[in-house]
Amino acid sequence: MKDFKGKVAVITGGASGLGRAMADRFASEGMSIVLADVEPNALARAEAEMKAAGAKVIGVHTDVSKAADVEALAQKTLAAFGAVHVLANNAGVAEGGNIWDNTVADWEWVLGVNMWGVIHGVRVFTPIMLGQESEGHIINTASVAGLISPPGMGIYCVSKHAVVTLSECLHHDLAQKSAKVKCSVLCPAYVPTGIADSERNRPADLKQARQKTAAEIAFDAGLKKAVQSGKLSAADVAQKVFEAVRDERFYILTHPKIKPSIQWRMEDILQDRNPTNPMG
């Protein structure tokens, strides 16, 4: 995409963190913004702040794990602005620990948001964007955890590996149609956002029914420390996302220092080696 002014961007997980940074960046280009988020207070605050700054914006309460919510999001977007040109499937949550300790509720929560949220976004919005016959771009937020497989992060990695391959397949599907709609997959490492506190938004029916294991507690502590130590800000990553959309670039790897770990994994596969621990 080269022309952003007057276009419409829909951003899930848009009320805070990386989603909010993307909203601000696209709004600075003159785009109208639809903020979708599951957290009502944060959503209302973000909408008010962006309006005060002069942006055209609406907030839509959305649980991306629910098909009906994402379908309603699309309807409200079209009712408010008449089109959608950029879709950022960005909402995400984190859970860790040993795979055998994760409960069904853990899997349903993480896969519901991280994987099904992207599936619903692509399923609902892509036909709309293709039907407009104008330039468009879909950004799916994965993670470097979608390109490597560290210990203690199985449930999260499964969700993010799914987003990477979904996005790669989407790229090929769109290319076969010679579509004006492009896509990217965002794979950041640690960025100071609220994902380490995502438990706050876990639905009541999927709450933990047990005490966390030592491995899960260690994951939570390690994630909070790592996120807080992130060298790139959410605004830095949002700028890289904007540049990728502008330049029609698929892979958005914001932290180049992680590339050797990705290479180790690829070489393990190609050389029939047992997996190398990317964390050393």
Image (spheres, rainbow, N blue to C red):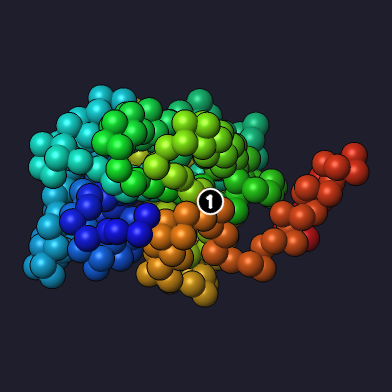
Name the side, left or right, on which 20 lies relative to 100: left
At 47% from the left and 54% from the top, the residue drawn is 248
Q: Is any part of residue 243 visible from this angle?
A: yes
Q: Is any part of residue 212 visible from this angle?
A: no
Residue 54 is situated, as x and y percent measured from the top left of the image, at 11, 67
Residue 188 is situated, as x and y percent measured from the top left of the image, at 53, 58
Q: Nearer the viewer, residue 180 or 30?
A: 180
Name the side, left or right, on which 146 lies relative to 44: right
Residue 100 is situated, as x and y percent measured from the top left of the image, at 65, 31
At 16% from the left and 48% from the top, the residue drawn is 59
Figure quadrant of the N terminus: bottom left
At 85% from the left and 42% from the top, the residue drawn is 270
Question: Residue flagged by tag 1: what amino acid is it?
Answer: Phe
> Mark 1 falls on what kind of element?
loop
Q: Which residue is mark 1?
A: 250
Name the side, left or right, on which 164 lies relative to 13: right
Figure quadrant of the C terminus: bottom right
